[in-house]
Image (spheres, helix red, strand yellow):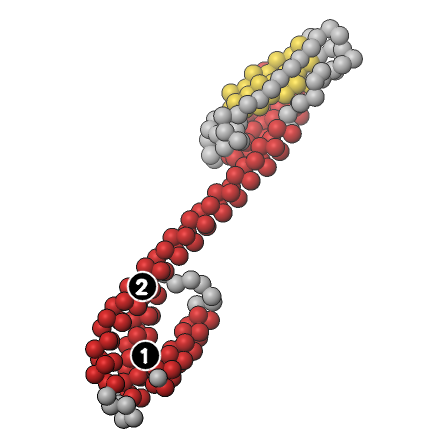
């Protein structure tokens, strides 16, 4: 009993040191199996060394049990670490997926908040009425619309669709929508608005993103 206790205690101390060296990270199955195999050889060798003089009769028993215990323990550790790593990987994937979904939801809310959503938009104007709604194919997309008064007699309305979908399209949409409104408020013609926005975007558009835009004035 004493040799087994000493061998197990020393193996536990070495295992604790390795645990600190690995910075409390859970080992991969092959690494854990290799380490436990080394520990088993160390444990049995130390038991044989400590028991050969005071307990000579125990040596044949230890030798007989060595291979079954070695195989059982190493295989058991391999199965255990394999299952734990699969569970950890699944949890990590789920955490990343949940984080992405939260970020996409937030981006969607920001994108929607940039579009006119209060209707009637011009309650004090009886000569016209306007309504709009957007339902993107994904949480975040490149579709957009806008409308605003340029002056007392002209309403600018814009409908656009940016190439591709997702966050890149939403970012490009934000830039285009801002530029379109900025240029339109200069009270220039719709064709000139589109031309100026195109001239601004074209030189630095390395991703070759584009948008199909309809811009009109209601007089």
x, y percentage for residue 51? 29, 88
Residue closest to the far top: 127
What's the mark number on residue 43?
1
What's the mark number on residue 193?
none
Observer-nearest of 183 and 26: 26
Q: Which residue is mark 2?
A: 76
Residue at x 56%, y 16% (from the top left corner): 214
State which quarter of the image contains the C terminus. Answer: top right
Q: N-terminal of the two: label 1 or label 2?
A: 1
Observer-nearest of 35 and 66: 66
- Tell me where residue 17 sits by quadrant: bottom left
Q: Is residue 31 visible?
A: no
Q: Is residue 156 left or right of residue 213?
A: right
State which quarter of the image contains the N terminus. Answer: bottom left
Q: Considering the numbered disc 2 on the image, is that residue within a helix, a strand or a loop?
A: helix
x, y percentage for residue 23? 47, 67
Q: Considering the numbered disc 1 on the image, is that residue within a helix, a strand or a loop?
A: helix
Q: Is residue 72 left or right of residue 173?
A: left
Residue closest to the far bottom: 53
Up the image or down, 15 lies above or below 2; here it is above
């Amino acid at each position: 009993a004493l040799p087994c206790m000493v061998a197990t205690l020393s193996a536990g101390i070495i295992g604790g040191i390795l645990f600190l060296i690995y910075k409390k990270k859970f080992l991969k199955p092959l690494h854990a199996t290799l380490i436990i195999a080394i520990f088993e050889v160390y444990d049995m060798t130390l038991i044989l060394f400590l028991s050969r003089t005071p307990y000579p009769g125990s040596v044949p028993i230890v030798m007989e049990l060595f291979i079954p215990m070695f195989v059982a323990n190493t295989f058991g550790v391999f199965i255990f670490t394999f299952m734990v790593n699969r569970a950890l990987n699944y949890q990590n994937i789920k955490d990343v997926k949940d984080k992405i979904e939260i970020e996409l939801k937030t981006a969607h809310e920001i994108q929607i908040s940039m579009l006119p959503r209060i209707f009637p938009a011009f309650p004090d104007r009886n000569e016209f009425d306007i309504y709009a709604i957007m339902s993107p194919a994904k949480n975040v997309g490149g579709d957009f619309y806008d409308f605003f008064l340029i002056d007392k007699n002209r309403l600018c309305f814009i409908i656009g669709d940016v190439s591709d979908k997702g966050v890149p399209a939403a970012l490009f949409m934000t830039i285009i929508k801002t530029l379109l409104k900025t240029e339109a408020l200069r009270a220039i013609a719709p064709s000139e608005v589109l031309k100026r926005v195109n001239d601004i975007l074209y030189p630095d558009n390395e991703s070759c993103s584009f948008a199909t835009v309809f811009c009109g004035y209601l007089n």
